[in-house]
Amino acid sequence: MSKIIISCAVTGSIHTPSMSPYLPATPGEIAAQAIGAARAGAAILHLHARDPETGRPSAAVGDYMAFLPAIKGGTDAVVNLTTGGSAVMTLEDRLAGPKAARPEMCSLNMGTMNFALYPLLGKRTEWLHDWEEPFLRNSDDLVFKNTPRDIAAVLQTMGRERGAKFEFECYDIGHLHMLRHFVDRGLVEGPVFIQFVLGVLGGAAADPAHFLHLKQTADRLFGESYLFSVLAAGRMQMPMAAIAAGLGGHVRVGLEDSLYIARGRLARSNAEQVAKVRTIVEALGREIASADEARAMLGLKGQAEVGF
């Protein structure tokens, strides 16, 4: 098997500050946790921005630029910026930071979908910020919009114009067929890097049977011309990573995807999750890829070509 790429999703736009004191929100926290994750073995850092005062998801240029130079100065890891931002943002808002930063990689959700976060409310009654509870509660009527026109715009704006390659986030079978459609249109060039996203309410559940069905479908659609990685939101994060690693794929962990390191125990950092998944995949006989090895595998433009 080839070397395994560990991606780390450092903060995301799903969990809120009241859920964990370890969720990074300020520029200093995001930079420090990203660098720590890279030192623990993450070759790719998947990054969202946050408003440093409230911890609310942000895509503002200033909020990204407050931590991106520090990350570049502290590690050679690949920076992968979200184009999904948050489901409550417009496409224009979501792309503001990435357009200015011109990263080596971007994530790209391959479809419009329900994005239900309200189960995360749980039994919590106290919140650090007044935006958190309504943000989660109102997600029972929330649609993440990424139409074919939106996808084409992201491929043009971030890919052809700025040289980024993509982590194609596929939450369900239809997303794989949409990706194949864009390959057939000539708008996606290889190597194709698919991130199977499991466990978000609105997409496929974090179940091994669903993952295997997704992989078998991708095998039929893309043959040997793609690489795959797996992330599982919540408690199935590490079990699904182990399955992916055993099948020759790559893995993603991070506090965007799960706040926990074990049942009932919050992860104290992104690096803690990276270290744990590294132990798992190395026990399966896989050797982790360095940042430069990941760049070669994915055909990236290189750290010198970014805009921060």
Image: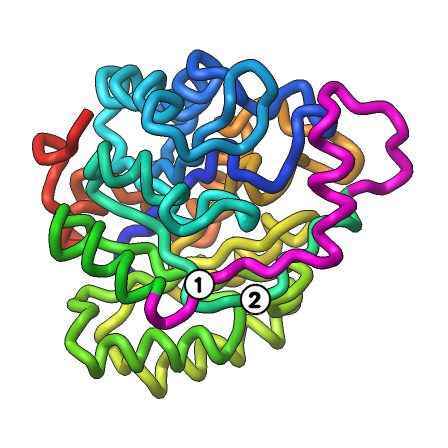
Residue 211 position by quadrant: bottom right
- Residue 204: x percent and y percent? 61, 69
- Disc assigned to residue 113: 2
What are the residue bounds of the magenta stretch? Answer: 121-149
Amino acid type of the residue that numbered disc 1 sits on in the rendered structure: Asn
Q: Residue at x 15, y 76 (%)?
A: 186
Q: Residue at x 15, y 33 (%)?
A: 306
Colouring style:
rainbow
Q: Residue at x 63, y 64 (%)?
A: 114
- Residue 212: x percent and y percent? 53, 76
Helix, strand, or loop for circle 2? strand
The residue lying toward the viewer, choosing from 268 and 79, is 79
Q: Is residue 116 a member of the stretch shown in magenta? A: no
Residue 104 position by quadrant: top left
Number of marks in picture:
2
Q: Residue at x 66, y 31 (%)?
A: 16
Quarter the C terminus occupies:
top left
Q: Which residue is mark 1?
A: 146
The residue lying toward the viewer, choosing from 91 and 190, is 91
Amino acid type of the residue that numbered disc 2 sits on in the rendered structure: Met
Q: Is residue 295 above or below residue 11?
A: below
Query: As drawn, is 22 to the left or to the right of 145?
Result: right
Is there a contact, CB below 8 Å, between mark 2 and mark 1? yes
Dot 2 surroundings within 10 Å: few (below 14), some, or many (20 or more)? Answer: some
Asked whether residue 6 is in view, the answer is no
Residue 261 position by quadrant: top right
Q: Is residue 86 above or below residue 100?
A: below
Query: As drawn, is 306 to the left or to the right of 152?
Result: left
